[in-house]
Image (tube, grey):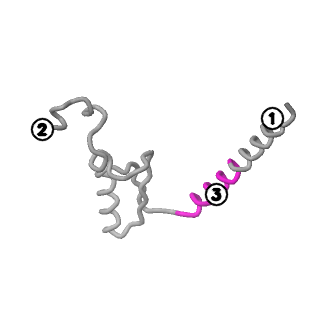
């Protein structure tokens, strides 16, 4: 019982330490950079907008909830097409 309590307390302390480190690193990184254009969404349209803004001499960053750029263009079929044979086979 005592070992389990000690282990739980250790895990909680480590979790708080990690969260504190992450918050301080994130806020410092975000506050130290400025951009002329912020594009929300890494879809094909978002990437095209960012490229055009860069060509126009602006500093650009793409932000969004996805892990990869390209949207459906890069990812293939959407979830609505997964059960439709005519969407896959043509």
Residue sitting nearer the eye, 3 or 82:
3
Q: Circle 2 — which element?
A: loop
Mark 1 or 2, nearer chain start: 1
State the residue position of label 2. Answer: 90
Mark 2 or 3, nearer chain start: 3
The segment highlighted magenta reads 19-33
**Quadrant where the N terminus is found in the figure:** top right
Q: Circle 1 — which element?
A: helix
Give the image location of residue 25, x and y in percent.
Answer: 64, 57
The answer to if 21 sits in the magenta stretch is: yes
Residue sitting nearer the eye, 63 or 56:
63
Residue sitting nearer the eye, 66 or 11:
11
Mark 3 or 1, nearer chain start: 1
Could you classify mark 1 by the number of other residues whose Cα lies within 10 Å: few (under 14), some (14-19), or many (20 or more)?
Answer: few
Tell whether 12 sits left or right of 56.
Answer: right
Tell whether 65 sits left or right of 54.
Answer: right
Query: Which disc number belongs to residue 25?
Result: 3
The residue under the point 83% across, 39% down is: 6
Give the image location of residue 10, x and y in percent.
Answer: 79, 43
State the residue position of label 1. Answer: 4
Residue extending farthest to the right is: 2
Q: Distance between the residues labelled 3 and 1?
A: 32 Å
Could you classify mark 3 by the number of other residues whose Cα lies within 10 Å: few (under 14), some (14-19), or many (20 or more)?
Answer: few
**Quadrant where the C terminus is found in the figure:** top left
The residue under the point 35% across, 59% down is: 50
Numbered disc in front, either 1 or 2: 1
Q: In this view, does 5 lie above or below 38?
A: above
């Amino acid at each position: 019982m005592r070992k389990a309590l000690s282990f739980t307390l250790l895990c909680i302390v480590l979790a708080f330490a990690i969260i504190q480190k992450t918050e301080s690193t994130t806020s410092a990184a975000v506050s130290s950079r400025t951009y002329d254009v912020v594009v929300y969404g890494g879809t094909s349209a978002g990437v095209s907008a960012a490229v055009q803004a860069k060509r126009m001499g602006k500093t650009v960053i793409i932000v969004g909830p996805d892990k990869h750029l390209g949207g459906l263009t890069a990812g293939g079929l959407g979830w609505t097409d997964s059960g439709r044979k005519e969407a896959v086979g043509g």
